């Protein structure tokens, strides 16, 4: 089987270029012409690169970091195979509070005694804003529970655009999918603010699942809810109308972050920039700005000072039935 190498955006480099990487370190900024990735091979080498152009079945990529003899040992081994790579953040001295587990939906139905046994398996790690906690297509060995802060789950498209698949806050968890099916991580997880993350090792995760039927039941319910949300996301991305996409996004976010006010309005308790909305809907930032401005002029929404969005009383009811079909 012919050996290939893929850049982080998912494209194949020629064998001659791989040999060059192993012989001479390449500086950041070098540019290469690559063929589209058709199949992943067991000898793939991940290369720190991003897409510059896409045309005629080929792409032009540019190295975003040095690569070659002096590349980081954590990324690849001497044979070119990808190592397990995950970020464990920095250690913190703060003692883990078992009472926090009661607020995590996965463990909310457990007794104090059960929570005590689980808390002994938890390690706390600190991640700074913009730290990548999990890398797409890497092997994962931990489940992560957010104690403080927020993260975003993202994937990169062929043209290098970042698509936000989900946003998680305190009490949410991630990383369980790759532990369950034994495959690589389906998306990257990045801290959007300084975050305190509780980590549970793979063996401890399965020990908890097999010994606590309530946790297994909660896990099934949460995974089903996430599956339903993924169907809504597919429906959102199928809309051709930018206003419908944006309204559908707010409808989805209201289910998780919505808070009703006495006058019947709904506040989305999540800070969203126009770029965030763009990455979540697949629209350009300029289009999102026009749509948000139109909603505000029509008094359908109000953007608060803390970047929370207040939806009018009729915003979610108006046309939403038509949108949902």
Image (cartoon, helix red, strand yellow):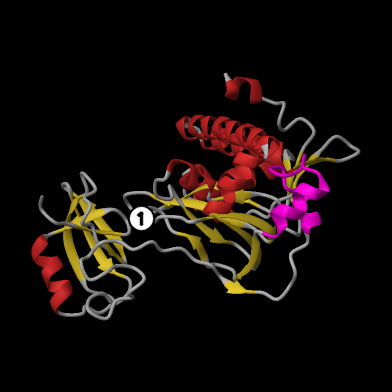
Q: Which residues are magenta?
A: 98-120
Instruction: Identify the image quadrant of the C terminus.
Output: top right
* 135 sits to left or right of 289: left
Q: Position of residue 126 (x, y in %)?
A: 63, 70
Q: Position of residue 256 (x, y in %)?
A: 70, 40
Q: Position of residue 268 (x, y in %)?
A: 73, 45
Q: Which residue is mark 1?
A: 160
- Residue drawn at the location 58% of the way across and 49% of the way down: 205
Residue 214 falls in which quadrant of the image?
top right
- Is 181 rendered above or below residue 61? above
User: Can residue 119 be found in the magenta stretch?
Assistant: yes
- Residue drawn at the location 49% of the way across and 66% of the way down: 87
Residue 85 falls in which quadrant of the image?
bottom left
Secondary structure under tag 1 reads loop
Q: Position of residue 147 (x, y in %)?
A: 70, 59
In front here: 10 or 5? 5
In front here: 169 or 215? 215
- Residue drawn at the location 72% of the way across and 53% of the way down: 117
- Residue drawn at the location 22% of the way across and 48% of the way down: 37
């Amino acid at each position: 089987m012919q050996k290939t190498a893929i850049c982080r955006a998912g494209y194949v480099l020629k064998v001659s270029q791989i040999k060059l990487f192993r012989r001479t370190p390449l500086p950041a900024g070098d540019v290469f012409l690559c063929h589209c990735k058709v199949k992943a091979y067991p000898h793939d080498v991940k290369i720190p690169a991003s897409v510059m152009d896409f045309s005629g079945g080929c792409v032009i990529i540019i190295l975003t970091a040095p690569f070659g003899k002096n590349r980081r040992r954590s990324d690849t081994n001497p044979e070119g195979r990808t190592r397990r790579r995950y970020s464990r953040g920095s250690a913190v001295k703060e003692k883990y509070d078992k009472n926090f587990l009661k607020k995590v939906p996965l463990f909310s139905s457990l007794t104090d005694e059960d929570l005590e046994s689980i808390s002994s398996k938890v390690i706390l790690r600190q991640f700074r804003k913009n730290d990548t906690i999990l890398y797409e297509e890497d092997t994962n060995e931990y489940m992560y529970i957010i104690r403080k802060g927020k993260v975003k789950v993202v994937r990169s498209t062929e043209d290098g655009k970042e698509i936000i698949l989900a946003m998680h806050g305190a009490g949410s968890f991630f990383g369980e999918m790759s532990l369950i099916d034994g495959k690589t991580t389906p998306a990257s997880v990045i801290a959007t603010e300084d975050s305190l993350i509780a980590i549970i090792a793979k063996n401890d995760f399965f020990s908890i699942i097999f010994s606590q039927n309530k946790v297994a039941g909660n896990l099934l319910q949460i995974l089903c809810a996430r599956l339903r949300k993924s169907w809504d996301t597919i429906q959102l991305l199928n809309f051709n109308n930018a206003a419908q996409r944006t309204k559908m996004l707010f409808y989805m976010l209201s289910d998780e972050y919505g808070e009703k006010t006495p006058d019947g309005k709904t506040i989305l308790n999540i800070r969203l920039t126009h770029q965030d909305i763009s990455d979540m809907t697949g629209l350009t930032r300029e289009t999102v700005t026009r749509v948000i401005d139109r909603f505000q002029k029509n008094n359908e929404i109000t953007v608060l000072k803390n970047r929370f969005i207040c939806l009018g009383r009729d915003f979610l009811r108006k046309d939403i039935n038509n949108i949902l079909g």
